[in-house]
Image (cartoon, grey):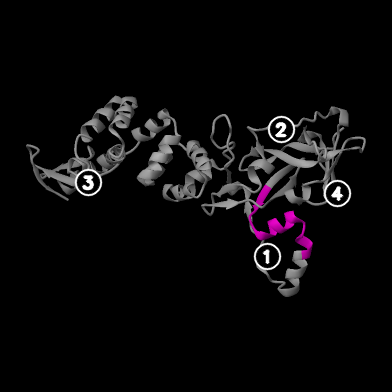
Amino acid sequence: MALSYPKTDSMFIFFSELEGLRVTDKDNNTVGIFYDMIIEPIGKYARSKILIVESGSWRKSYASVGWAHVSEVTQNGIRIDIGASGLNFSAVLNHKSELSLRQDILDQQVVDTNNQNVIRVNDIHFLLADRDMVVAHVDIGLKGIVRRLGFEALVDAVVKLFNKNSDYINKPRLISWKHIQPLSINPVSMTVKVDVSSKQLLEIPAADLSEIMLDLSPKHRLALFKTLDITTKSQIFSLLDIKEQKSLLEDLGEAESVEILNHLPTDEAVDFLGELPKAAVHNVLGLMESKNAKMLSTLLGYAGESAGGLMTTEYIAVSEAATIEEALRIIKEKTLKAETIHNIYIVDQENHLKGLT
């Protein structure tokens, strides 16, 4: 019978300290070694869900153990409360759609939503909380690499000998898991497997998020982009250059591409479509909302560098007889609806242009 919570030597432990640890069953027989852990989100953090046990030297096989069956975790080994006969070993792991620490986090690129950059994970830091192992931090520093290589004690001793105040010793580079956005890809949806930091992602300005995306590999860039809401997608798309825009839409399906174009300001949609072959433009317009398609089709009839090519259907016209208060009210109402306003046109009673600001 499982204990109420796993026993540990410490409240904290690193993934590198778990790697290769002996796993024993309820009868204290060795059934394999620690290989991996499947985690699940709990609010802004994540906790242990499944222990992956590895067995065999040449022909390796793996068994999944629900974390509820883990009765003890120490730096000397892991104990489970079931017998060896209750484990089903297989040469293939069947957790492709779930978040694996070894495959999806360790040595992988992730987004640090707090510092708004892309980082590489060198080790993973756990906190024992109740009966769960909670992912507390990721280690992005040199110390994480040294720890995984097994030289932490030696290197620490040498560094302290020469400089006991070294940042290597006193300032570990740990990033809180609540600021981490994993980029592992769900093979079915082709989006990121788990969006643990969606709120933090939305707090990153579109300009900064677009720069983050450019630091990612093409497949992770696409997976992260597909995870975002349509407003953020269109904002980021607007900030990309034409080459990057074309590349992104080529990787997206037609439906997603058209949705983005439908949400772009008119002049930006015209600029983008003007760079495409006519056949491609006709295909896109045929898939767009009829009102938008008709508007864009009309504007695309102008040469790219002509006045028409720079046109937008979004504008503000104010009567020359309007008071300042009336003009401000009109401007406020119009700008709430319009995406792009460059000028305010002054017109007379017959709507003739008298000037602009």
Amino acid type, residue under disc 2 in the picture = Leu
Q: In terms of image quadrants, where is residue 164?
A: bottom right
Which residue in the rendered view is the most extreme toward the bottom? 162
Amino acid type, residue under disc 4 in the picture = Asn
Classed neighbour count for the residue bearing mark 3: other residues with Cα under 10 Å, few (<14), some (14–19), many (≥20): few
Q: What residue is shown with label 4?
A: 76
Name the quadrant of the N terminus.
Answer: top right
38 to the left or right of 341: right
Comes first in the chain, label 4 or label 2: 4
Q: Secondary structure at mark 1?
A: helix
> Where does the image place residue 235, in percent across and percent down from the top left?
39, 43
8 to the left or right of 339: right
Q: Is residue 140 magenta?
A: yes
Label annotation for residue 321: none
Amino acid type, residue under disc 3 in the picture = Leu
Q: CA distance from mark 3 to mark 4?
A: 72 Å
21 to the left or right of 281: right
Q: What residue is shown with label 3?
A: 328
Q: What residue is shown with label 2?
A: 93
Comes first in the chain, label 1 or label 2: 2
Please report the bounds of the magenta region as a residue range: 136-154
